[in-house]
Image (tube, grey):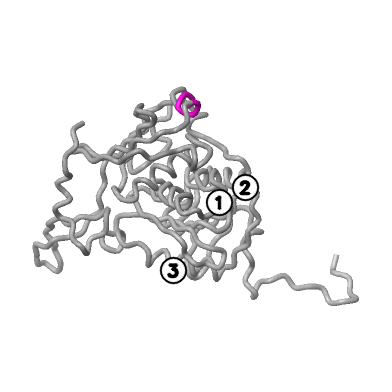
Amino acid sequence: MTAHPNPADSTHDTDTPAGAVRRPVERWRDGAMRQVDDHVAEEVPVAFVYNDAPFAVMMATPADLEDFARGFALSEGIVESPDDVVVERVEQFIEGMEIRLRIPEARAEALALRRRSMSGRSGCGVCGSELLEAALRYPAPVTTDVRVSPESLSKALRALRDAQSIAALTGATHAAGWAALDGTLQLAREDVGRHNALDKLIGALHAQDFDPAAGFLVVTSRASYEMAMKAASVGIALMAAISAPTALAISLAERAHLTLIGFARDDGHAVYTHAQRLLPPPAIAPVAARPGRNPAP
């Protein structure tokens, strides 16, 4: 591939965040048509190249790509430690983006054994897996024993909505956010692919020296198997999604000791696994027995 400027760059302006561009559109409302410029999310092929060997091509939003590269390497088990991956450079071509990384030779040799084509829709990380054992991975059980209140969860969800600059303009991206236990949102990342948004967040957490186990995860998508797998694989103990989980995600979360929450909204949520980490609101707190009286059998 030959490096060239991306033609889309000419439509960026100071009010448009990276990952969004302006495009002309005919907008029809109430029987009338107007020609306007509209903001749309970018989606381009992003190739990962480890030690000069191509590994995977993902469809992604071209923003926070170094975070994406680090997070993908960690959540996919390509490396075990953030120190094992070095982003050498990110290059832009007519055909898309390429991220060149350097990993320890032993990890590169192991990667060659499981090499697969991962070109899929919007970052489907198991698309193209040739073997069942390559598609389904079960991380080690999460050992962190965090406690999160419903108020903290609601606070983080509200903050994540406010942090979605690309989605606010385009309505086309997912987001993943990481919050402290009091609900203060520390980091957020966006992408057209929900898996990519989470990988970007994981990469950003390590780049900024946050401990993933010291907070909790909120995402704007459904809680699929891979989202649960990626969260548990880096030690996150609680994941809350605004939409539903899948049966396989519930099974993995149970096995990985991950607290999995779905339908997380301002007015409530559903806890599917390891509910002990989510503190009950005062209104439904267990009633203690009176002193001197035995509890009912």
Which is nearer the N-term, disc 1 or disc 2? 2
Tag on residue 158?
3
Labels in figure, total: 3
Q: Are marks 1 and 2 in contact (CB under 8 Å)?
A: yes
Residue 129 vs residue 267, the one in the foreground: 129
Q: Which residue is mark 1?
A: 236
Residue 121 vs residue 16, the one in the foreground: 16
Dot 2 alpha-carbon crowd within 10 angstroms: few under 14, some 14 to 19, many 20 or more: many
Q: Which residue is mark 2?
A: 142
Tag on residue 292?
none
Residue 259, horizontal then vertical, whole percent: 59, 54
Q: Amino acid at mark 2?
A: Val
Residue at (35% x, 62% y) in the render: 164
Seen in the picture, residue 127 relative to 239 is either above or below; the reply is above
Residue 58 forms part of the magenta stretch: no
Residue 65, horizontal then vertical, whole percent: 34, 46
Question: Which one is in front in this view, the residue at disc 3 or the one at disc 1?
Answer: 1
Give the quadrant of the N terminus.
Answer: top left
Dot 3 alpha-carbon crowd within 10 angstroms: few under 14, some 14 to 19, many 20 or more: some
Give the quadrant of the C terminus.
Answer: bottom right
Residue at (90% x, 76% y) in the render: 292
Q: Measure the C-alpha gap from mark 3 to mark 1.
A: 20 Å
Q: Residue furthest right?
A: 292
Q: Are marks 3 and 1 in contact (CB under 8 Å)?
A: no
Magenta residue span: 106-110
Q: Amino acid at mark 1?
A: Ile
Residue 233, horizontal then vertical, whole percent: 54, 43
Q: Are marks 3 and 2 in contact (CB under 8 Å)?
A: no
Judged from the image, the secondary structure of the residue bearing numbered disc 2 is loop
Residue at (38% x, 31% y) in the render: 50
